[in-house]
Image (cartoon, helix red, strand yellow):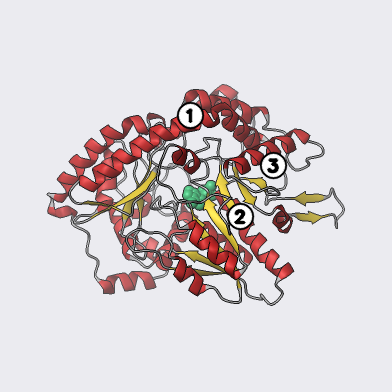
Amino acid sequence: MAFPKTGRTAESLLAELEARKGNDVRWKEGRVFAYVYDAGPEAMETVKQAYGAFLTENGLDPTSFPSCLELERDVIAMALDLQNAPPGAKGSFTTGGTESILLSVKTARDHARATKPHITEPELVLPETAHPAFYKACKYFDVKPVVTPVDTEAFTALPDAMEKAITSQTVMLVGSAPSYAHGVVDPIADIGRIAMKAGLLFHVDCCVGGMYLPFARQLGADIPDFDLSTPGVTQMSLDFHKWGYAAKGASCILYTDGELRKHQIFAWSGWTGYTIVNPTIQSGRSGGPIAGAWAALNFIGEEGYLRFARATQEGARKVCDAIREIEGLKLLGNPPGNLLAFAAEDFDIFALSDAMKARGWYLQPQFGFGPSPANLHISVGFVNAPNVDAMLDDLRAETARLRADAAYKVAAHKPEDIAGIAAMDPAELLDSMSGVFEARAGGPGAEMRPINALMDALPHTARDRILTEYINRLYAKPQNTSGSA
Ligand SMILES: Cc1ncc(COP(=O)(O)O)c(C=O)c1O
């Protein structure tokens, strides 16, 4: 698109924007079991209006926009209350789980710099199920990730392994409540005891669980201790834009000891312009996400979140029970909440995601890693719950169909082929597969199985290189054309 010479009417622009969603996953029908957190039209409209009302307000300067400051204080206070924080706890509103985690790792590094000068090469101990945002944080802030194994059946962290991984350079331990991939909760209380004994910070990644587990627990779900009252927990990431049903761009980082937050803040007046004092990564920032989160929490309230959790817990239990019974499928671990993953025992799981996609469902493919085989992830949200039975009918039918067809056995790649591909220059590899990736770059009917199977067979470092090259090309590709950019 060339830079426009003249403006266009709002009407034509908005119509075009709507039309451009044509190839997106169709989330409004409640058939997408990932990515989207939809509380229904009334709540979403309220969030939209609140977001719009604060679109232009600038959270950069809380003295010029006390409204943004007050909304943030409210939202953080509500999160601390929900997570049973001790007195003196504090937090910051951020743009998402990733930013919350980035800030937490930076805080851990800078806290160590200030209080433990012997630490020159800081390390973070994390189970292999921890979210990639921790690796991103380690890359950005030059911290070494020390990865520990998880239970090969339960997919939960092994506290002993984490304790053994602690060195004189360790700055923080990590646990998930729950992990995204399998939806299982790490033994937070045990890890907390280790953190206290070793005098370390301990981050509980509650990005996807923070606005869900407290309510599921209240309804009687068997969820181990995970919140800010758990001894040893020093910080937590919690996303409002997941099961808080706020608009995207809404998360927080919480500290049981508010003094820790100081390590996050960046101040700079050593230049010719206005003074910068940023508690988080952004500087100029719209008040929209804060207002949207504030509105979601107050519109839905405890009563509403309990109602959502009841519906989603029921839906998720149905899905888990069905998967345990469908021949050829295996539920991974024992997820107590609304996130789960399952593998195929004797056929290609990625053929199943394609088949379900053809029937209008989106189940999220996840590559095999460590003890976790290739699998499909399901997040059951409020609008998915009424569709669970229909989804399971199709899942049963497609599983039976694929298992009966020899063409859908797991694609066997020869080790030497995989080694050869892994060693290739990613640009050359993509050139040699001319158009294969591009042809599958989305669209409702795109068959992803061959690509997923190949990626799954590769070591993660090789697939990360290939996918980096692929995404770099994808964003450079002119619209409505095919072939490599
Ligand atoms: C456990 C966990 N941590 C971190 C994140 C990253 O959150 P975001 O996508 O908001 O950056 C996610 C996202 O799903 C998550 O599930």
Query: Could you classify mark 2 by the number of other residues whose Cα lies within 10 Å: few (under 14), some (14-19), or many (20 or more)?
Result: many
Query: Could you classify mark 1 by the number of other residues whose Cα lies within 10 Å: few (under 14), some (14-19), or many (20 or more)?
Result: few
Quarter of the view holding residue 318: top left
Q: Using the numbered discs, state the Cα–Cα distance from disc 2 to disc 3 in whole angstroms.
A: 24 Å
Q: Is residue 369 left or right of residue 322?
A: right
Question: Which of these two is toward me, 410 or 431?
Answer: 410
Quadrant location of the C terminus in the rendered image: bottom left
Q: Using the numbered discs, state the Cα–Cα distance from disc 1 to disc 2 in whole angstroms.
A: 40 Å
Tag of residue 18: 1
Q: Circle 1 — which element?
A: helix
Of the two numbered discs 2 and 3 in the rendering, the one whose residue sits closer to the viewer: 2
How far across and how far down the image is residue 428, in percent?
Answer: 40, 66
Q: Is residue 118 above or below residue 451?
A: below
Q: Which residue is mark 3?
A: 285
Quarter of the view holding residue 29: top left
- Look at the numbered disc 1 and say if its residue's Cβ is closer than 8 Å to ligand 1: no
Query: Disc 2 residue type?
Result: Gln
Question: Which of these two is toward me, 165 or 199?
Answer: 199
Q: Circle 2 — which element?
A: strand
Query: Disc 3 residue type?
Result: Arg
Question: Which of these two is toward me, 140 or 428?
Answer: 140
Q: Is residue 255 above or below residue 145?
A: above
Q: Residue at x 65, y 33 (%)?
A: 291
| Nearer-N-terminus badge (2/3) | 2
Tag of residue 235: 2
